[in-house]
Each structure stands twice: as structure tokens, then as C-alpha cells.
């Protein structure tokens, strides 16, 4: 695991490094308002992706792990059909984003192009993760989210003038397109010829939709927890303030992204399989590894960012970011708490405690809405950061409490079975 983890962290490190370089590039060479537009575009695409996916992967991941390759290809084909139907419904509705002036009409073409490409690439990444191919998954992620950034910034460093955000979005589109080509190549060895003998399983799709819908609602709530602060800031204080917040939030996001790449995405398929097969000793061992990896990773990465934020600020060469450094400490704390919440999350997910996950997320979302409403109008950046920290703390506490209740129920069930066994055998 160590060698694989280091390779994945290296690839994800290159991806994160590119995002960091792009962040500095925009912060140094573009206006704070352009940083705000860039941040709102990214966040809105991230949220809209879930309307196209409806979190169907949550259902499909467990199903794929439980079946043989011949059945798996049918599931993948049926999932693509499911998403195609969702496209017909969701894409026209998403135009409301522009009517509501969340994003300017001049960016509508980029929005739809990037949204569709990002969704297809994201689902490919998830499939490869499910098939326990994290190296290829992270390579695809690097091409999708990192390689094109190095190319654009490299051209700029050679003395060529880079235009506005449209150039950045052009590079993004090319990168995601190339990642899709690689994903198709990586999945070529699956037994696709078996599809000739399999018709579309509409009952399986309906079941998947029923299972995924609560997760989709929970994911939207989680997106609200993570990104509501930007929209509140844009509404009350404008794009310039969103630009400052985007800068610090992007740096703080290093913590959960690195931890997911280096440990979570490697361990969680094995955790699910062990629990599904009743290998409880292995499951407990893997959960301990996950807990240690997330906790240690959060501490180490936090120290690195605390020490590194000062040279980062000097590279931007803009006083407006240095003047608001105190916001970063709150943002970083929220990122760490969110990472820790994934420990009970995957334990609940393995147990199929879907309602508990949904309930916890909605509670956190409610906390986010109340806190942002009360704090952002008066306290601006600090209010937004603290509101998100409160919501992440609520998410962590709810999942921990729910998991303890579930474990207590498990122990009671085991005790009852043991008592019935003794009665049945006359002991």
C-alpha cells in the first residue's frame, strides 16, 4: 500500500501543484474580480455535476464490487443510459443559472462544454477507482485537471501574453477531452462483447435511482455546506470578496484532496468488500488504517500549509490577500474537520446506513444556512469561513454519534443471536 499510496500522492500532488500554480497565476496577473468569476464558475460546475450524475455511482459502486466482469459491463452500459436520460432533463433546467445572473451569459458556452466533459471524465475516474486502479484513475485526473495548466503557464513564462479566463477554459476543455480518450483506452479490456447478450436492465436502473436519490439529496446538502459561503459572499459583498475567499479556500482544500488520494481512495473499496463478505476482522483492521491515515495526514498537511502560507502570499504580490490572512486559519480548520468526518462516513457507508448519512448531511446543511445568514452580512469573509467550520463540525459529530448507535445495535444483535443459539441447543 505504501508504494501505491506514494505513487498516487505524487500524481495527485502534481495535479494539486498545477491548481496551486493556476491559483497564483490568476491571483498575480488577473484582477480579484476575475478570481471571483473563476471561483464561481468552478463551484457552480462542481454543483451542477451532481445534477447530471444524481449520485448513481454510490449504488453502482457497491453493485459492481458484488458481481463478475460479465455483469459489470452491463452495469456500466446501463449507467451511461441513465445519465443520458438525465442530460435530457437537467441540461435545459440549468440555464436558470444564467437567468438568475449567478454567472454571466457570456460564459454559457464554456459552462455547458466543461460541465458535460467533466461529468463523463469524473464517472470514468470513479469506475477505475472501483476497479482498484487508483494509479490510472489519478493519471486521468492529472490530465483532466493538471497537465493543461502546466502547458498554459509554461507558454506564459516564455513571454507569450495569455488572455483572460477564456484561454484558461480552453485549456481546461482540451485537458478533459484527452482524459476521456485515456479512460476509454484504460477500460478497453473489459468483456464488452458480453453486452450482445444483455438487454438494458430497467428494473436495476429504477432500483439504482431509488437508492441513489437520498444520497443525491445529501450530496446537494453537502455542496451547500461546502459552497454556500461563496454565494452568500457574492450576494452581500460582490465578486471581489469571493475572489479573496476562493484563494484561501483553494489552498485549504489541499488537505481533503491529498488525504483522499493517498489513502481513502485506496482503502475504501477494500473496506466495502470486507464488510460485504462478512470479513469483520479484516474490516476493522482496514478501518484502523483509514483512521490513522486520515488523522496523521490532516496533522502533517496542516503544518505544511501553516508554514507555507507566508511564501505563498509573497508570490501573489498583492496586499489584499495578506490583509485577510486570518480568514485562512478558519478555512484550514474547516478543511481538517471535513477530512476527519470521512472516517465515520465510510464506516456508515459500508454498513449501508444510508439514511444516517443523509440525516447527518442535512443537519450540517441547516447549520450552514443559519450560520451564513447570520454571519456573512455583518462579518463578511470571517463570517463565511466560521459558518462553514460550524457546519463541518456538525457533520462530524452527527456521523460519529450515529456510528456509535449503529455499533451498539450490532452488539445487541450478536448477543440476541447467541442467546437464541444457546436456547436452541439446550445450553
Image (tube, rainbow, N blue to C red):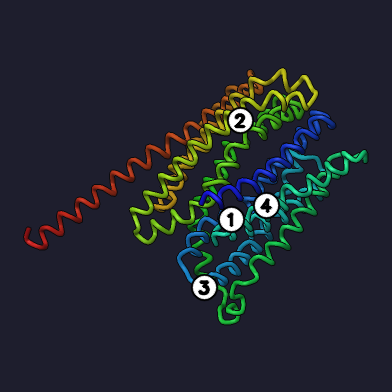
In the shown orientation, is residue 358 left or right of residue 113? left
* Front residue (pair 65, 201): 65
Q: How far apart are marks 4 and 2 (CA)?
A: 23 Å
Q: Where is residue 78 in the image (x, y as percent from the top left)?
A: 58, 68
Q: Residues within 10 Å of mark 4 (few under 14, many from 20)?
A: many
Marker disc for residue 304: 2
- Label 4 belongs to which residue? 141
Label 3, on which residue?
A: 71
Kindly identify the residue that appears in the image at 56 percent across and 27 percent down: 387
Secondary structure, mark 4, is helix
Labelled pair 1, 2 in contact (Cβ < 8 Å): no
Q: Can residue 233 be seen in this view?
A: yes
- Mark earlier in primary sequence (1, 2): 1
Q: Which of 94 and 205 is in front in this view?
A: 205
Q: Is residue 63 left or right of residue 419?
A: right
* Spot occupied by residue 258 in the image (x, y as percentages of width and height): 59, 42
Between circles 2 and 3, the one closer to the viewer is 2
Measured Cα–Cα span from mark 2 to mark 3: 45 Å
Q: Nearer the viewer, mark 4 or mark 2?
A: 2
- Image coords of residue 150 (percent x, y): 79, 45
Q: Residue 77 carries which label?
A: none
Question: Helix, strand or loop at disc 3?
Answer: helix
Residue at 7% over, 58% down: 427
Disc 2 crowd rating (10 Å Cα; few below 14, some 14-19, many 20+) is few
The residue sitting at 55% across, 28% down in the picture is: 333
Seen in the picture, residue 406 relative to 297 is either above or below; the reply is below
Say which label, 3 or 4, has the lower sequence index. Answer: 3
Distance from Cα at disc 1 to Cα at disc 3: 22 Å
Q: Which of marks 2 and 3 is nearer the N terminus?
A: 3
Secondary element under disc 1, as helix, strand or loop, is helix
At horizontal 71% and vertical 54% (from top left) the residue drawn is 91
Amino acid at each position: 500500500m505504501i508504494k501505491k499510496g506514494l505513487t498516487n500522492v505524487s500524481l495527485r500532488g502534481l495535479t494539486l501543484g498545477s491548481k496551486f500554480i493556476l491559483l497564483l497565476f490568476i491571483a498575480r496577473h488577473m484582477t480579484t474580480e476575475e478570481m471571483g468569476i473563476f471561483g464561481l464558475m468552478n463551484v457552480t460546475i462542481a454543483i451542477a455535476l451532481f445534477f447530471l450524475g444524481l449520485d448513481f455511482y454510490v449504488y453502482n459502486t457497491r453493485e459492481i464490487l458484488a458481481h463478475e466482469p460479465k455483469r459489470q459491463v452491463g452495469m456500466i452500459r446501463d449507467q451511461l443510459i441513465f445519465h443520458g436520460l438525465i442530460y435530457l432533463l437537467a441540461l435545459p433546467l440549468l440555464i436558470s443559472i444564467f437567468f438568475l445572473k449567478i454567472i454571466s451569459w457570456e460564459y454559457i458556452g464554456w459552462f455547458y462544454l466543461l460541465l458535460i466533459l467533466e461529468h463523463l471524465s469524473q464517472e470514468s475516474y470513479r469506475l477505475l477507482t472501483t476497479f482498484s486502479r487508483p494509479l490510472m484513475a489519478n493519471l486521468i485526473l492529472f490530465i483532466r485537471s493538471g497537465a493543461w495548466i502546466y502547458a498554459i503557464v509554461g507558454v506564459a513564462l516564455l513571454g507569450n501574453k495569455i488572455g483572460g479566463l477564456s484561454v484558461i477554459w480552453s485549456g481546461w476543455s482540451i485537458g478533459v477531452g484527452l482524459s476521456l480518450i485515456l479512460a476509454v483506452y484504460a477500460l478497453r479490456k473489459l468483456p464488452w462483447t458480453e453486452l450482445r447478450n444483455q438487454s438494458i436492465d430497467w428494473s436495476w436502473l429504477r432500483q439504482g435511482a431509488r437508492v441513489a436519490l437520498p444520497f443525491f439529496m445529501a450530496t446537494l446538502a453537502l455542496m451547500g455546506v461546502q459552497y454556500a459561503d461563496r454565494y452568500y459572499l457574492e450576494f452581500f459583498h460582490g465578486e471581489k470578496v469571493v475572489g479573496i475567499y476562493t484563494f484561501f479556500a483553494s489552498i485549504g482544500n489541499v488537505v481533503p484532496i491529498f488525504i483522499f488520494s493517498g489513502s481513502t481512495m485506496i482503502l475504501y473499496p477494500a473496506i466495502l468488500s470486507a464488510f460485504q463478505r462478512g470479513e469483520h476482522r479484516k474490516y476493522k483492521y482496514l478501518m484502523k488504517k483509514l483512521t490513522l491515515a486520515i488523522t496523521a495526514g490532516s496533522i502533517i498537511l496542516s503544518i505544511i500549509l501553516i508554514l507555507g502560507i507566508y511564501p505563498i502570499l509573497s508570490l501573489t504580490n498583492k496586499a489584499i490577500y495578506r490583509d485577510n490572512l486570518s480568514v485562512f486559519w478558519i478555512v484550514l480548520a474547516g478543511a481538517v474537520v471535513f477530512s476527519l468526518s470521512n472516517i465515520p462516513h465510510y464506516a456508515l457507508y459500508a454498513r449501508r446506513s444510508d439514511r444516517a448519512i443523509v440525516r447527518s448531511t442535512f443537519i450540517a446543511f441547516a447549520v450552514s444556512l443559519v450560520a451564513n445568514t447570520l454571519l456573512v452580512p455583518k462579518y463578511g469573509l470571517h463570517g463565511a469561513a466560521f459558518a462553514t467550520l460550524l457546519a463541518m463540525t456538525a457533520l462530524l459529530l452527527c456521523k460519529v454519534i450515529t456510528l456509535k448507535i449503529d455499533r451498539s445495535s450490532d452488539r445487541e444483535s450478536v448477543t440476541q443471536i447467541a442467546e437464541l443459539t444457546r436456547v436452541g441447543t439446550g445450553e
